[in-house]
Amino acid sequence: MSIRIVDVREITKPISSPIRNAYIDFTKMTTSLVAVVTDVKRDGKTVVGYGFNSNGRYGQGGLIRERFAPRILEAEAKTLLDDTGDNLDPDRVWAAMMSNEKPGGHGERSVAVGTIDMAVWDAVAKIAGKPLFRLLAERHNRKADPRVFVYAAGGYYYPGKDNSALRAEMRGYLDRGYSVVKMKIGGAPIEEDRQRIEAVLKEIGNQAQLAVDANGRFDLETAIAYAKMLRDYPLFWYEEAGDPLDYALQAALAEFYPGPMATGENLFSHQDARNLIKYGGMRPDRDWLQFDCALSYGLCEYQRTLKVLETHGWSPSRCVPHGGHQMSLNIAAGLGLGGNESYPDLFQPYGGFPDGVRVEKGIITMPDLPGIGFEGKSDLYKEMKALAA
């Protein structure tokens, strides 16, 4: 009996919040939640794969419903299967979605495809009866490591939030087991940001390290001014100083900032990743790459990105994806990435870990749940189950 995808469903959900970074506020932010429904039964239940796009990019319901879902549903079922015929082939599903699409100009379609791709991989691992991270490790002849480094992303600007509130937020992350915390910069004058940084460093002491994130706000002059200020502090990294496609700015900045830098969350293809590491002055011995599969055509494309990095002398361990979702946790555990972002208090129920998973000294241990493991996060699975019903 042939395995078939019988439906692809999408609903656009709000993840609004009054927080802001240096570039945008999140008062009207949305995400697309997707269910890929198959005709496969496991333990008496229909196998459904789930996916959603990361925060910072809006839901892609129009593109999903009008272009990408119909192509999957119109494809002949056997063309979407792997060579055994016993499971879906994510790369063949991906190719069906991208049929009749011109190269380049990735725009928002990379988010739409990445969202569906997440759901397809969830279904594939469930059909195989394995956690996705173990399935990936097997396919890449690696040993799966269920332990994943995670850092706490926060420190947003918020109406009425003073430095004491910022310190209390960061203390809360340390109390929950994180060893690296991140805060926003660039949304206030440089001297005010310096005071915010010093307040956090005083609070965390030697218990944790601090990363800072400008969300692409700076021109070169401002990026350099911040670099000169930031190099006075022992930061974990200086993130996304300028426009993500301004590789010349990133390369010039390395001359003024000897510490680790991070970028890549707003690059959406393996070609963009290649351009960054060729022309952006990124240093494989200290810098970090933050490509997010949920925004960049999914895991199929992310594996191509990792091949590009390897070709240019970069280790997967220098990748710590943006997004704070369970998909990247599985990729990190299965393919040996350096870790993953986490949003302990934000963008719920989509971020975070399965129920019962705790952070210990900056590390979480992946549970052995089939697929991506969404069913283990009760508040998120409630949303997903409603879409699939």
Image (tube, rainbow, N blue to C red):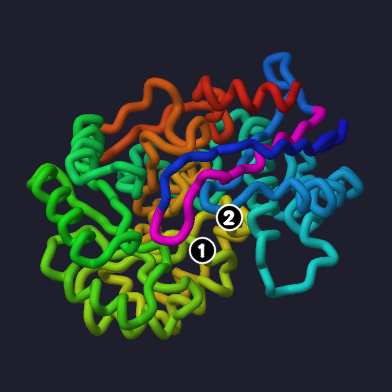
Residue 38 forms part of the magenta stretch: yes
Amino acid at pointer 1 = Asn
Where does label 1 land, which residue? 266
Q: Residue at x 64, y 27 (%)?
A: 384
Q: Residue at x 40, y 68 (%)?
A: 217
Residue 373 forms part of the magenta stretch: no
Residue 128 pos. (x, y %) = 64, 33
Residue 129 pos. (x, y %) = 61, 28
Where does label 2 land, which residue? 295
Is 311 in front, or is 319?
Answer: 319
Is 237 in front, or is 96?
Answer: 237
* Mark carried by residue 215: none
The reply to whether callout 1 and callout 2 are in contact (CB within 8 Å) is yes
Few, some or many C-alpha atoms within 10 Å of disc 2 (few <14, some 14-19, many ≥20)?
many
| Mark toward the start of the polypeptide (1 vs 2) | 1
Q: Is residue 108 left or right of residue 347?
A: right
Q: CA distance from mark 1 to mark 2?
A: 8 Å
Residue 305 pos. (x, y %) = 53, 65
For residue 150, say whether it is visible: no
Magenta residues (range): 21-39
